[in-house]
Amino acid sequence: MTLLHDDRLFPTHGRARDLARALYEQVRDLPIVSPHGHTDPRWFAENEAFPDPAQLFVTPDHYVFRMLCSQGVALTDLGVPRADGGPTETDGRTIWRLFARHYPLFRGTPSRLWLDHSFQHVFGIDRRLSEDTADWYYDHIADCLARPEFRPRALFDRFNIEAIATTEAATDDLRWHRMIRDSDWGGRVITAYRPDGVIDPEMAGFVDNVALMGQQTGFDTATWDGYLDAHRARRAFFIDHGATSSDHGHASARTEDLPRDQAAALFAKALRGTCTAEEADAFRGHMLTEMARMSLDDGLVLQIHPGSRRNHSDDVLAMFGRDKGFDIPGRTDYVTALRPLLNAVGMDPRLTVILFTLDETAYARELAPMAGVWPCLRLGPAWWFHDSPEGMRRFREMTTETAGFYNTVGFNDDTRAFCSIPARHDVARRVDCAWLADLVASGRLEEDEAPEVARDLTYGLAKRAYKL
């Protein structure tokens, strides 16, 4: 028995299925380029064994615990740490049994594909997870994790990862990246510049973060010019640690191109804590344009992924903090929102802006037409809630007609769950090969063109877009 069907996600009819199989065979073993994600660089720096199966698969993965929460399972019972340090379950086997008992909840979901892929291909398991097999699973995975070949660096090499980007706050000291760089291991783990904490006046700790950035760089961040110079210095520091991109997770895609005096006045109000909500949003929008201008000088690719209505549960935010599964997609405007930035710098060939969305209604109406004309714009792949076979298919259907393939950037996994990385890339490769096979079978793509496109979607576009 195997957990996964060999032809999963391929077309169900004759010639297209054969074409998809043939294309997939040409790309299935290409190296993984993972230019946007949230794995912990400390794993690769210290190369310590993962603690137990629950800590690897359940407790850190919001895709997993949000589903269990939806059926009444308490986050404390899954070992999710409380913000106040209060009691949560710490026994890995107890957490794993609870997870296994609820495993049927994942039927038909992308999480099930990722988990089963990890169980089968990483740990060699050939039986389904259930309440009856929970202890066998736990013992088998725990035994594997104790071996050297399941340490983070060994898995990195085994997964055939060519490069992976983590994401760190602008004030991070990047100690783990330095440790990786100074080690004798050759894996390429780079950082990405995430300045939300020093750009968003409404984020907790904004004033302290700005002051810390000043201490780190020696610039007076109580002044507008010093604040911008500190950003430049921190970006240079991140570039020295391998960064090729910045990453911006604002609530909206709003940009502004304000006169200098107006921007400086908003910054002063932000430091005093007197910004209105509208002024804070305008400041965030202006800083996206400032970041784009800095990219003209230092070459960082600018990633914008707006539209998440974060921390929808006040109680969960208060008890567990941010990023605990209660982030929900919302409607997002791009045409009006991005116009100030694009009119300021959007025709400059030195700039690359990669756009993500949680609002699929924007693909055909806004994003594809914009990426299909503005030289700086590229479309990030189906993201987060739409990182699924159906979401990937919809992405291709709604964007290819206007933006083509070459105004997109391939696939990135955007995950904290390390073992899901090869699973997610495998899903993307299969879905893209199925889409290309349908194009060939329906006479919209020549058969001899499809292998080149498949390779680009799998490997080449991400390397070029992210300058890897």
Image: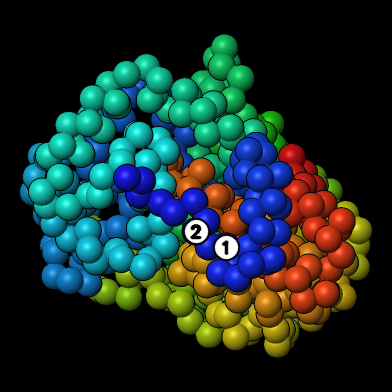
State the residue position of label 1: 10
Q: Is 387 situated left or right of 62 in this image?
A: right
Identified at 12% across, 39% down, the residue is 135
Q: Which numbered dot is residue 344? A: none
Position in image of residue 384 (x %, y %): 48, 64
Q: Is residue 254 above or below residue 288?
A: below
Residue 240 seen in this snapshot: yes
Is residue 205 or residue 309 the one in the foreground?
309
Is residue 307 or residue 436 the one in the foreground?
436
Quarter of the image for residue 447 reads bottom right
Quarter of the image for residue 321 reads bottom left
Pick out the residue farthest to the top.
184
Q: Is 311 situated left or right of 376 in this image?
A: left
Residue 323 seen in this snapshot: no
Quarter of the figure that contains the N terminus? top left
Give the class, few, some or many, for how many residues have Cα within 10 Å of label 1's Cα (few <14, many ≥20): many
Quarter of the figure that contains the C terminus? top right
Is residue 212 or residue 268 the one in the foreground?
212
Q: Is residue 125 above or below residue 38?
A: above
Identified at 49% across, 65% down, the residue is 388
Identified at 32% across, 69% down, the residue is 326
> Type of residue at label 1?
Phe
State the residue position of label 2: 8
Position in image of residue 153 (x %, y %): 48, 24
